[in-house]
Amino acid sequence: MRIAFISPGSFPVPVHYGGGSVETAITNIAGRLPAHWNVTVLGKRFPGLKDKETRNRVTYIRMENTSQRSYLHSCIRYLKKFPHDIVQVENRPSFVPLLKKRLPCPILLCMHSLLFLRPFALGGRNPQDCLNSADHILTNSHYLRSLLLSRYRTSTPVRAVHLGVDTGDYRSRWSQKGKRIRYRLRSRFGLTGRTVVLFAGRLIPIKGVHLLLESMIQVVKKNPRILCMVVGGSRYGSNRETRYVRKLKQMARSIHPHVRFAGTIHPTKMPQYYALADLVVTPSIGPEALGLVNLEAMASGQPVISTAIGGIRETVKTGVNGILIKPSRLKQELTAAILHLSENPALSERLGRNGRLFAERCFSWDHTARQYARIYYQIHSPNKGRT
C-alpha cells in the first residue's frame, strides 16, 4: 500500500528541533506502518534538511518553503506524478477540497485541534464543506471527535485514534536502568536530595504555568527542598521572551532558588528531564485535545497532576496514575496536590508505575500505528481487494 502524509509545513519533519504534536505524530506513525508499505511524507524545506531523503523506510519530500497555497499545489503536482493509494492531510482542513478535486484516491483528514477550522485559516472556505470533502476524518481523542461533531455535524465518518509515546526512549524511573539514569542525571544537575516538580510545554497563558508558580510560592514555605523545573519556550523551538514569559520570570524571582527555567530543549533530550523529576504538573486552563506531555510523563513512570479538561481526562485518572483537578479549583487545590505527592513517596511510586503500564498498553506509538494501519486497510480493501 502507498500512503502519503501531507504535513502542515509549519515545522520540519521528521521532528528536528522545534515541532508540536502534529510533527511528532507524523514522525512516529509513518515509520511504524508495515515494512512492506510505501510511505511518503510531504513537507516544506528547512535549513539542514535535504530536499529528498529516506529515513526509517519513510521517504521525505520537501517542497519550496513559500506560501501555503503554493505548498499545496506543489504537493498536488507530486502526488499526480507519483500516485498513492491514500493521502492523509494533517490538521489543515483547507487543503482537503482541492486535493479531493485533483486526486482520485481517498483523502483522510487528521485533526489535532479545531484551530484551523476558524475563519482566519480557511481563506473564505466553509468549514463544513472542508470536512465534508474528506473521505474520512481522524481525531487524536474522543473529546476532539465529540467537539468537532457537535460544532460542525459533518457527514464524513469521524474516528478517534489516540496519539502515543515512545516507550523505548522514555524509560520508567522505577526500572533498574531508569534508576541508574535518574541517579546520574540528578547528580549532574545538582538535584540530589531535592524533590523536582516538572513542567514541560509552551510558555503561554493557556498552559497555566503562572498558576503553577503561584502554587510554588506556597509549596516552598512548607517544603523548602522542592524545586520547580520549567522546560519550554514561548513557541516550539523558540526561547523568545514574550510579555508572558517575562511575567513568569518575575514571579519566580521571589523564590529564585526553587525555580529553574531550562528553555527549549531538543526533543531527544526530553527523556532526561522526565527522568530527573519526581512528579509532572500540566495545569492547563484551556481545552487540550489530548496532551502529549502527560503521555511522556506516564511512560517515564512519573505521577501526573493535571486539569480535568478536554482529552486529558482520557489519559490521566485520579488515584490511578495521577491527580485531576477541575479548572475552577486549580488555585485552591494545586498546592495541596503537589505537597500530597511530594510527601507520599509510596503513593507517587504506585501512580507512576500504573502510568507506565497504562502507556505501554494503550498509548505507545506502536499501538497507535497499528490502529492507523487497520483503518487504512479498511479504506483501501473495498477499492483494491488487496494491499
Image: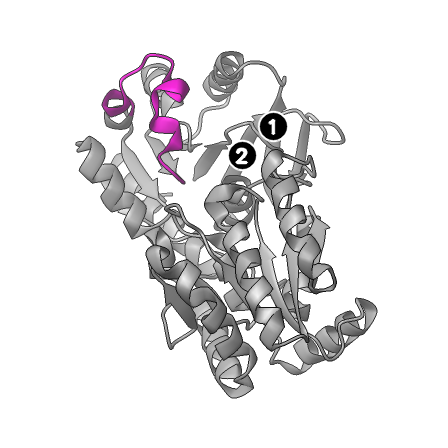
Q: Which mark is residue 61?
A: 1
Q: Earlier in the sequence, mark 2 or mark 1?
A: 2
Q: Is residue 340 above or below residue 105?
A: below
Residue at point 76%, 77% (across, down):
192
* Residue furthest out toward the bottom: 346
The mark found on residue 213 in the picture is: none
Q: Secondary structure at mark 1?
A: strand
Q: At x 74% / y 63%, what residue is drawn?
A: 257
Q: Position of residue 273 (x, y in %)?
A: 67, 62
At which x and y percent is residue 30?
52, 44
Image point 54% across, 49% down: which residue? 28
Estimate the x, y position of residue 294 in percent, counting from the top left: 49, 60
Q: Nearer the viewer, residue 78 or 366?
A: 366
Residue at 41% x, 27% y is 92
On whether residue 18 falls in the magenta region, the answer is no
The label shown at residue 40 is 2
Front-lying residue, 218 or 53: 218
Dot 1: within a 10 Å radius of its alpha carbon, few (fewer than 14), some, or many (20 or more) residues? many
Q: In the rendering, at what x and y percent does residue 309 appear?
A: 34, 54
The secondary structure type at the circle numbered 2 is: strand
Query: Which quarter of the figure has residue 184?
Result: bottom right
In the displayed structure, would residue 147 be above or below residue 297? above
Amino acid marked by disc 2: Thr
Amino acid identity at mark 1? Ile
Can you say which quadrant of the picture contains the C terminus?
Answer: top left
Labelled pair 2, 1 in contact (Cβ < 8 Å): yes
> Does residue 89 appear in the picture of this structure?
yes
Residue range in magenta is: 112-130
